[in-house]
Image: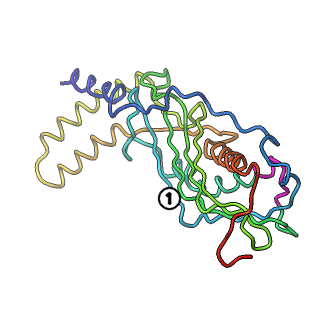
Amino acid sequence: MRRRLIASWVVVLLTGCMANRTRDLAVTPPPEPRSVLPPALQGQRIAVSFDVQSTEIGGGHHEGLMQVRQPWIYGLSGEQKELLYGNAPQVAALAFSSELQNQGFQVDPAGAELLFSGTVKTVTLNTFGNGTVEGFGTAGNYWEATVVFTDLRLSRAGKLLWQGGETAYAKLSPCPARLDWTLLTLLVKSLNGAVKLQALKKATGPQAIVAAAKGYLYNFEGTYTMDKTRTTPIDVAARLAAVQMLRRMDGLQPLAVPGVK
């Protein structure tokens, strides 16, 4: 029984759902400053406003060679999830605005000639751990983000100059979430799990079964540490979205808007 349980837990680390195809992608470099802004817009003062109230946030933590998304009992703590996802829309909006500044705009609402607005529609952040401390069962040791911006509008004195939407992806390494398990930890938890599984099978009555089931599940509860990072893939993806938008503005032509002359 113990051998079967150890083998089954090793399988959890090594297999699972179909592996994410982003494992082999290169790390995403940040955009170069002052590289894409059309000459007509260089140095112009711009006010920026983003709607982040209705942003949809998704993603999760993954472990194992086949990048299994971890259920709540084995994944990150609530505090760690809040650290990663809590301000995701605001991070995306700020990074987009900062990149407009990096590319040559003067982002300042006071006396701005141009108004830029948009919505942070979705932010998806996935983390892929490095397995045990020894790297056994690594999911790739990186994190990635996809940010979707909609209703992007650039206008001057009420006249719409450009409108559209942007989606951008970024991948960074290493993953800041680290599983505090060694191979010895895995072995001990597997052996303890075998004992608790037997207790679950022998339990009688609803309360005893629930208690035994909790003991079995919590035996395999993941314990993670979160490293400090200087930037996130959300930040890089949002900056790339800003650059993509500015590239589309090359040769900017005013758009006709009904009711606006």
Residue 121 screen position, x and y as percent: 55, 59
From what the image shows, is residue 50 above or below residue 240? Answer: below
Q: Quadrant of the C terminus?
A: bottom right
Front-lying residue, 196 or 41 = 41
Does residue 199 appear left or right of residue 258 in this picture? Answer: left
- Nearest to the observer: residue 78 or residue 69: 69
Classify the position of the N terminus by image quarter. top left
Residue 44 in which image quadrant: bottom right
Where 151 sits versus 1, above or below? Answer: below
Residue appearing at x 78%, y 65% in the figure: 47
The quarter holding residue 225 reads top right
Colour mapping used in the image: rainbow
- The answer to whether residue 41 is magenta is no
**Residue type pointed to by label 1:** Glu
Residue 228: horizontal and vertical position, in percent?
Answer: 65, 39
Q: Secondary structure at mark 1?
A: strand
The location of residue 174, given as percent across then percent down, is 59, 30
Residue 18 lies, with reference to residue 82, above or below; the image says above
Q: Is disc 1 surrounded by few (<14), some (14 to 19) or many (20+) residues within 10 Å?
A: some
Q: Read off the residue under disc 1.
A: 56
Residues 146 and 86: in front is 146
Give the magenta-colored segment's residue range.
99-107
Q: Residue at x 81, y 52 (%)?
A: 101
Q: Residue at x 84, y 67 (%)?
A: 112
Residue at x 75%, y 73% (from the top left corner): 158
Front residue of 11/202: it is: 11
